[in-house]
Amino acid sequence: MSGAAAADRIDTFALASSQDPYPALHRLRGQTPVCWSDDEQAWLLSRHADAASVIADRRCTVVDISATLAKLAEASGREFGDLVALMQVVLFLRNPPLHSTERRFLARVMGMWPLASFAPVIAQIAGGLLREATAQGGIDLVTGYADLLPALVMAHLFGLPRQDALDFVALASDITLVFDRGRSLRFYTAMNEKAARARGAMLEVLHHRRAHPRDDALSRMIALNDAEFGLSDLDVATRAFFLFLAGVETTAALIGASLRALLLHPAELTRLRAGDIGAAAACDELARWCSPVQQATRFATVPISIGGQQVAAGQRIVLLIGAANHDPEAYPDPDRLLLGRPGPANLTFGAGLHHCIGMGLAKLETSIAIDQLLTLPSLRLTAETAAWQGHRTQRRLSRLPAAFV
């Protein structure tokens, strides 16, 4: 197929963990922006306009991992029931009409608190983490701040002790690897065990909340379900764990990458310190430039044309979100960080039917994390290269050591 040779040189797994994936993505876009990859058995899209069009196109459906896992379990004789149940409530892996039902339940839960009401709690948690770091004379901005802040915010939302929340984070971080392609049966068996532990642990908390309700997310989920939805307690616990997972993973990735971006761009950091632009206004550009979500996958349900290429029904389409967010046709000089940059909406949090339900909270946490950091003396990075996790769909730092200047 047209463009196969160019696409075969792109290793989409290696890109997310490389120091700089964008030169390779720029070359791909310049040669064949819509191209077939024999390795991926998919069309790769690297232009913003093409990716945005496919995201909005109802003829292109998301990959239902739960159905794939169920078929794999049946064919292999393995038990993936807990993992299948968890994947069935992951909003960005569901298609209509099931997507609408799941989203309505979680949207009702998230809408129970005004977004602004989270700000004091987030600021208090962020400030406490940074005070601990100041006393130590240095900080790993990922393990000691970016990874902890969303986890502790969700702990507050769910009324969980700190260690219980961190245990849930550890399970969530492993389970999100299921979103990558090409994993083994042994891997899925291990993830099914983790999904079982996660659902069981959240179910225990839910049972305690039934007996001792509080003003927290889980208590409100129970009341909402009992009044309107009629799900089993295990089903509610499964949705609660997904909500916890969704509130931590991408937010932590965005905060960590954003802090690194600002320390690498002192002129932009100076603009923030001077108040020329606010941290909240800076978040869109940071989400674009950092692109913590690197790719998303769709299936064509009917023959469609994308960028002059004919995509057959049933073929897979990989949207290279990082490439789209760095497309010079959408964002002139795209590899430059320019806080307050004009331009179309970036695709980090999806769009249309599958826009992220927690986008507002993620941006609020990121802006407050930055604001709190600005109250400290200047920091400098102490490692010459960044340590990125090995993940196909997400670009996330594993550490970011810094010292006070």
Image: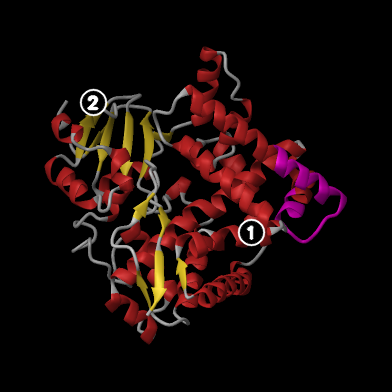
Asked whether, in this view, residue 273 is left or right of residue 104, the answer is: left
Give the distance between the C-alpha atoms of the residues marked 1 and 2, in whole angstroms: 44 Å
Task: Decide: is 265 above or below 143.
Answer: below
Disc 1 marks which residue?
Answer: 111
Q: Position of residue 89 (x, y in %)?
A: 59, 38
The circle drawn on residue 38 is 2
Asked whether, in this view, residue 178 is left or right of residue 239, the answer is: left
SS at badge 2: loop
Q: Position of residue 72 (x, y in %)?
A: 50, 19
Q: Amino acid at mark 1?
A: Gly
Asked whether, in this view, residue 290 is left or right of residue 188, the answer is: left
Residues marked 1 and 2 touching at CB (< 8 Å): no
Q: Position of residue 187 (x, y in %)?
A: 49, 28
Colour scheme of the rendered structure: secondary structure
Q: Is residue 103 visible?
A: no
SS at badge 1: loop
The magenta span reads 200-221
**Residue 300, magenta (yes or no):** no
Which quarter of the rendering shows the N terminus?
top left
Q: Amino acid at mark 2?
A: Asp
- Residue at x 52% of width, y 41% of height: 174
Dividing the picture into quadrants, the one containing residue 343 is bottom left
Dividing the picture into quadrants, the one containing residue 121 is bottom right
Mainly helix, strand or loop, the magenta region? helix
Q: Earlier in the sequence, mark 1 or mark 2?
A: 2
Q: Residues within 10 Å of mark 2 (few under 14, many from 20)?
A: some
| Foreground residue among 101 and 91 | 91
Which quarter of the rendering shows the C terminus?
bottom left
**Residue 216, magenta (yes or no):** yes
